[in-house]
Image: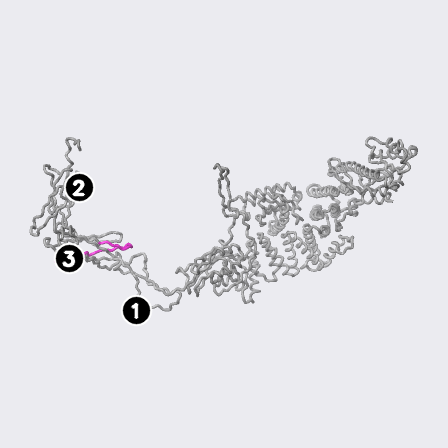
């Protein structure tokens, strides 16, 4: 019989069931036990709890034992203590009750009361008798009787009568259901009471935790009971809470032990660790570990294993495998930390074994959740690696020593035997892996690859890369360099993409270390050029690079190509302007290349070259699709096809490579404007600040920058700017490359190449996208005649230097002859000479005396000074000249700044003889102020009509009756041929006839003039002209009217020209003329 | 005790990584970088799932044998990472509130540092003052 099987009750955990004692008619109960046990868990019951805890619906199970009045149950053992008591009877006879049963019931009640038990029930099982139904219902039943005698307040409902379901199933259903429901209810009520009491006690115990005598293990077992009960009631989450509380409590103790004095009980956990069995994630309570805890013999690993298994059991029951995985990791980490904090002794590798097994076991549980598997695999892999290192199983290690072999045996022993005979159990696999290098490597690689794959699958790429690096190191040691390189390159790329330069540098170092056998000069070069690394490291790799270039490339015919930007940075490229303004064939074109060398030392560059491509529109269009940059495509799209003549204008002459980099969008000013918004009635609604161009700020950055540019393909270097054998220094280098073009056309610059040590060629395609180029034309031979000093005028009469420039243009000239140009073909070169001096002359008259005034000046554009000497005036005929120039002044200076020199001669002639025209020549010697040689300057001129024909004399007389000339009074002007501040009254012009006979006496003309103002007034101007009478013959003359013709300036002499007359103010008037 | 503080840009490139103590040799500097770098995976995962940007995420799960990592993300997706040593007595006992305070303070320092008008957002932080302040934060406050 189940109820009396006491061995069942010793089992705990999942086998725990609420204990119910049965008193009274045991045989009766035995017939009912099976349906009872079956019926109780069939439905849930509402569990109302005190302290405001949430109400739960729980499924109950029960196990029944015979009531033993002598047995004393420990008060605070929730599991072994019966929770409920039932008294069974089927007595229907009141008399029988009175005589026999009453006593028994009373004893039972007394015993319960003595034990302070309030959770009981009395069940009267009735047998349904059809015969009785017709009878009157008895006045009192046995149940009423019992109730009447034993019921206290609020306990009336604990007396239940039920119809025996065994004997009459159909009729009993209702009463049976009532019994079960009541039973469930009362069990829970009982638990509530017990648990409240228990929790109070538990709290009390916990509060004593700082008591030196307090023991964690005891407390653990105590609180675990609560967890068991909660688990038993199906409240797995609450059960887990109990374990978590214990976990936290323990952790805190361990952590605090580091700071404060550790409690005595903690010393038990410091005992050496002898067992590191794999945890088993099942719902079964690991009894052996629990025993150890109860006996206080558990090591830290035992305790942690137990706790984790229990926690996992609760999580398994609530279907949370992912939670198990994450708890596994933190448990593994915490445990290792605690091991070190408590300084618990163990053989090397034992914790790693345990951690590895824990991770792999957990993996099996949470196969459904990939995201949690990856870290587990990662950890398992790391721990396996640790073990491999300890046991000498890593590739590259020498064969395991005897100590290491002994360690393997020890570790295997500590793991214990796998309970299941499953071949793939983690313990078995680990043991196998530790047996030999091959199996270890197989297992390690399996785990690592799986971890990496899983990380990739869940998108944790950085972790995947990290495992990749571990794998690379492993493969590298295995000698499978190519596999290692793949992982490292992957990792390197991702580090570079995300700007983790230090990590990239480190990976690069590993890459070289891995690929050392491959003689990887390229990577050496890159490392040597990595600014982030220390200079010593860079020096080392520079030497490595040089070594590998010499060793591995010496036998190669052609240079090996690699990317230039890794080691050098182009700063600028400039086409130097040609001397002639254009580039012509057979004449060198120069390009200045400025670049920065990142290599740490000087390096010999065999050849620096820039490839030259023929430039055509089509060609650029072809090339651009190769370059994937979007900006380039757009620029090609907007460019309209132009004539080839215009092409060269599109070409860039100089470029700074910095310009090519995309501008940092953060540096662009945002177009923010302020705006006023008006309502319909023109009143201000709001003022806003707006950023109009959202596209600029929201533009997605081009992801193509992450793409690693492939090493450019070397193109034809037949046409190239080049310079050989230079030394490239670290830092900035400035070199000029040359090229002598032989063909006309438009060319553009292409690949840039630097060949190091003859064998390693660095190539850059940075210039391919830029239309940088030049136009070459062929030019013929040309001859130029140039002034030496272009700003100075050519001055006639002076010896001046000129240059004859012969340009050979694009053709080669072997010899040059200069032949006289006037012999065969004449080439006219217009030359403009400026006279050195300019002379002007004037004829001056005084009565009949004649003077010649010559003024000399220089009109040369640039400043030049002449010293003049020996001025001379020569006249033809019999006219002699009297020199009036001062003789003392020797040197007269004439400069082109406007200074003039004047000379004066008098013509000595008979005044009465009317002389004809005469030729005169002015000559003067001049010499440059710094020149010895003097030259003569001649200026011939004609002097005509120089004889004085008329002398005009003027005389002014006051008007009649007055003594003085007064203003506003009429005066009389007497002209003797002779003839206005003067108002000429009456006649203003007249004709006089001069008789040739009547010489000596002049003609007199009188005019009335009136001075208008007072003062010394010059006499009125008199002009004498020839009167030519109207011609009678209309054919003969153009004019029929008489006309006037002026005399030559020397023919009329105004004797009174400078005369003045004193005019007095008008006489004051006596009276005012009213009518005026 | 915090051992390392990192500022990671929104493109996940390192803007500043500062550590203190006698383990400033290249080796440890690097190991911190590996650690912070992989921690980004965990941080990003949290960011992808949590809606609140300014969330203070707790320990990242990996590599916590010796170190605990705490992450903090600003509104501009700048990630601040605080690494504490789980082996040192003060580090293992650190409280979440302390970490939160330290991270907030770090955020303030970062904001001050990038207020420099000559600092280009996205560039590495080279400010000596910032470095000094961060190191004192690591030493004193946590």
Residue A812, percent from left and from top: 39, 67
Write down the quadrant of residue B99 in the picture.
top right
- Residue on which disc 2 sits: A981
Quarter of the figure with the N terminus of chain A = top right
Few, some or many residues within 10 Å of mark 2 (<14, 14–19, 20+): some
* Labels 1 and 2 positioned on one and the same chain: yes
Write down the quadrant of residue A252 in the picture.
top right
- Residue A874 is covered by the magenta coloring: yes
Q: Is residue A952 above or below residue A572?
A: above
- Residue A514 is covered by the magenta coloring: no
Q: Chain of mark 3?
A: A
Do we see residue A545 in this rendering?
yes
- Residue on which disc 1 sits: A824
Left or right, A555 with respect to A1073, comes to right
Q: Nearer the viewer, mark 3 or mark 2?
A: 2
Left or right, B19 with respect to A431, comes to left
Please count the marks in the image.
3
Q: Earlier in the sequence, mark 1 or mark 3?
A: 1
Query: How much space separates mark 1 and mark 2, taking CA atoms?
Result: 73 Å
Q: Chain of mark 1?
A: A
Residue A876, percent from left and from top: 15, 59
Magenta segment: A856-879
Q: Earlier in the sequence, mark 1 or mark 2?
A: 1
**Can you tell which mark lies on residue A918?**
3
């Amino acid at each position: 019989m189940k109820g009396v099987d006491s061995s069942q009750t010793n089992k705990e955990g999942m086998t725990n069931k609420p204990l119910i004692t049965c008193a009274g008619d045991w045989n009766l109960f035995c017939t009912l036990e099976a349906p009872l046990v079956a019926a109780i868990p069939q439905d849930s019951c509402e569990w109302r709890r005190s302290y405001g805890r949430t109400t739960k619906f729980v499924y109950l199970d029960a196990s029944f034992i015979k009531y033993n009045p002598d047995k004393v149950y420990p008060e605070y053992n929730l599991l072994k203590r019966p929770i409920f008591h039932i008294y069974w009877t089927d007595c229907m006879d009141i008399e029988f009750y009175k005589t026999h049963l009453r006593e028994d019931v009373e004893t039972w009640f007394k015993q319960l009361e003595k034990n302070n038990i309030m959770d009981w029930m009395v069940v009267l099982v009735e047998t349904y008798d059809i015969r009785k139904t017709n009878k009157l219902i008895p006045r009192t039943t046995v149940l009423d009787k019992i109730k009447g005698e034993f019921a206290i307040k609020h306990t009336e409902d604990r007396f239940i009568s039920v119809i025996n379901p065994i004997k009459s199933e159909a009729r009993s259903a209702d009463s049976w259901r009532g019994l079960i429901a009541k039973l469930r209810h009362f069990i829970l009520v009982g638990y509530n009471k017990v648990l409240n009491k228990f929790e109070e006690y538990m709290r009390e115990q916990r509060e004593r935790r700082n008591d030196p005598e307090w023991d964690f293990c005891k407390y653990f077992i105590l609180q675990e009971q609560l967890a068991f009960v909660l688990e038993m009631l199906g409240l797995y989450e609450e059960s887990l809470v109990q374990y978590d509380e214990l976990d936290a409590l323990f952790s805190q103790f361990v952590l605090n032990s580091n700071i404060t004095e550790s409690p005595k009980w903690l010393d038990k956990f410091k005992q050496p660790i002898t067992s590191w069995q794999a945890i088993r994630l099942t719902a079964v309570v690991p009894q052996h570990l629990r025993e150890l805890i109860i006996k206080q013999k558990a090591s830290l690993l035992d305790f942690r294993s137990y706790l984790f298994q229990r926690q996992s059991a609760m999580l398994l029951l609530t279907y949370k495998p992912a939670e198990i995985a994450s708890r596994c990791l933190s448990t593994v980490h915490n445990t290792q930390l605690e091991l070190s904090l408590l300084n618990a002794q163990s053989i090397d590798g034992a914790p790693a074994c345990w951690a590895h097994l824990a991770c792999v076991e957990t993996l099996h549980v949470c196969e459904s959740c990939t995201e949690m598997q990856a870290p587990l695999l990662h950890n398992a892999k790391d721990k396996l690696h640790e073990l491999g290192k300890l046991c000498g199983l890593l590739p590259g290690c020498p064969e395991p020593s005897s100590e290491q072999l002994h360690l393997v045996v020890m570790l295997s022993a500590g793991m214990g035997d796998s309970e299941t005979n499953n071949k793939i159990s983690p313990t078995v696999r680990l043991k196998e892996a530790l047996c030999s290098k091959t199996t270890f490597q197989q297992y390690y690689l399996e785990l690592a690859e799986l971890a990496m794959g899983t990380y990739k699958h869940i998108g944790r790429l950085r972790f995947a890369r990290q495992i990749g690096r571990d794998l690379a190191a492993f493969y590298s040691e295995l000698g499978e360099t190519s596999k290692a390189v793949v992982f490292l390159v992957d990792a390197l790329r991702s580090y570079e993409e995300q700007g983790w330069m230090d990590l990239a540098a480190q990976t690069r170092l590993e890459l070289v270390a891995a690929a050392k056998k491959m003689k990887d000069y390229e990577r050496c070069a890159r490392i040597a050029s990595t600014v982030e690394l220390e200079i010593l490291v860079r020096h080392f790799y520079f030497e490595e690079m040089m070594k590998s270039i010499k060793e591995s490339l010496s036998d190669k015919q052609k240079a090996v190509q690699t990317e230039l930007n890794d080691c050098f940075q182009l700063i600028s490229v400039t086409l130097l302007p040609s001397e002639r303004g254009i580039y012509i064939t057979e004449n060198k074109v120069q390009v200045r290349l400025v670049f920065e060398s990142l290599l740490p030392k000087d390096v010999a560059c065999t050849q620096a070259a820039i490839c030259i491509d023929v430039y055509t529109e089509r060609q650029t269009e072809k090339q651009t699709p190769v370059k994937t940059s979007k900006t380039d495509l757009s620029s090609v799209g907007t460019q309209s096809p132009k004539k080839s003549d215009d092409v060269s204008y599109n070409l860039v002459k100089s470029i700074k490579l910095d310009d090519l980099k995309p501008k940092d969008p953060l540096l662009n000013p945002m177009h923010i404007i302020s705006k006023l918004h008006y309502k319909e009635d023109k009143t201000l609604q709001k003022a806003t600040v707006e950023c109009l161009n959202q596209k600029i700020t929201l533009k997605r950055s081009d992801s193509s920058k992450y793409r690693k540019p492939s090493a450019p393909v070397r193109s034809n270097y037949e046409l190239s700017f080049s310079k050989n054998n230079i030394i490239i220094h670290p830092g900035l280098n400035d070199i000029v490359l040359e090229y002598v073009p032989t063909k006309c056309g438009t060319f553009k610059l292409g690949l840039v190449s630097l060949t190091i040590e003859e064998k390693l060629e660095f190539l850059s395609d940075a210039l391919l996208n830029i239309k940088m180029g030049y136009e070459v034309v062929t030019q013929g031979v040309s001859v130029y005649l140039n002034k030496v000093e272009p700003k100075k005028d050519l001055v006639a009469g002076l010896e001046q230097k000129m240059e004859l420039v012969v340009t050979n243009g694009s053709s080669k000239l072997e010899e040059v002859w200069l032949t006289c140009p006037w012999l065969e073909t004449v080439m006219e070169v217009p030359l403009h000479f400026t006279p050195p001096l300019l002379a002007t002359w004037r004829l001056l008259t005084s009565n009949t005396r004649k003077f010649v005034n010559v003024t000399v000046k220089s009109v040369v554009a640039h400043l030049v000074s002449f010293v003049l000497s020996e001025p001379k005036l020569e006249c033809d005929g019999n006219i002699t000249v009297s020199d009036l120039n001062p003789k003392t002044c020797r040197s007269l200076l004439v400069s082109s700044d406007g200074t003039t020199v004047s000379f004066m001669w008098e013509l000595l002639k008979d005044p009465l003889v009317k002389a004809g025209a005469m030729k005169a020549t002015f000559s003067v010697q001049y010499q440059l102020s710094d020149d010895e040689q003097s030259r003569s300057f001649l200026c011939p001129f004609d002097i005509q009509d120089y004889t004085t024909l008329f002398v005009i004399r003027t005389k002014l007389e006051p008007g009649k009756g007055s003594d003085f000339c007064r203003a506003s009074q009429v005066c009389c002007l007497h002209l003797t041929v002779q003839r206005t501040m003067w108002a000429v009254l009456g006649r203003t012009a007249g004709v006089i006839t001069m008789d040739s006979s009547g010489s000596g006496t002049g003609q007199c003309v009188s005019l009335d003039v009136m001075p208008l103002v007072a003062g010394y007034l010059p006499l009125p101007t008199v002009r004498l002209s020839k009167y030519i009478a109207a011609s009678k013959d209309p054919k003969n003359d153009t004019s029929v009217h008489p006309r006037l013709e002026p005399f030559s300036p020397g023919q009329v002499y105004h004797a009174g020209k400078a005369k003045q007359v004193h005019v007095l103010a008008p006489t004051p008037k006596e009276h005012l003329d009213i009518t005026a | 005790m915090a051992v390392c503080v990192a500022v990671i840009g929104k493109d996940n490139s390192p803007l500043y990584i500062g550590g203190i103590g006698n383990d400033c040799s290249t080796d440890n500097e690097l190991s911190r970088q590996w650690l912070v770098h992989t921690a980004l995976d965990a941080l990003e995962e949290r960011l992808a799932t949590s809606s609140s940007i300014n969330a203070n995420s707790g320990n990242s799960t990996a590599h916590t044998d010796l170190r605990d990592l705490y992450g903090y993300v600003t509104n501009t997706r700048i990630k601040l990472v605080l690494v504490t040593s789980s082996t040192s007595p003060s580090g293992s006992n650190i409280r979440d509130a302390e970490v939160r305070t330290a991270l907030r303070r770090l955020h303030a320092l970062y904001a001050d540092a990038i207020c420099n008008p000559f600092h280009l957002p996205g560039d590495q932080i080279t400010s000596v003052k910032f470095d000094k302040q961060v190191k004192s934060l690591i030493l004193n406050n946590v």
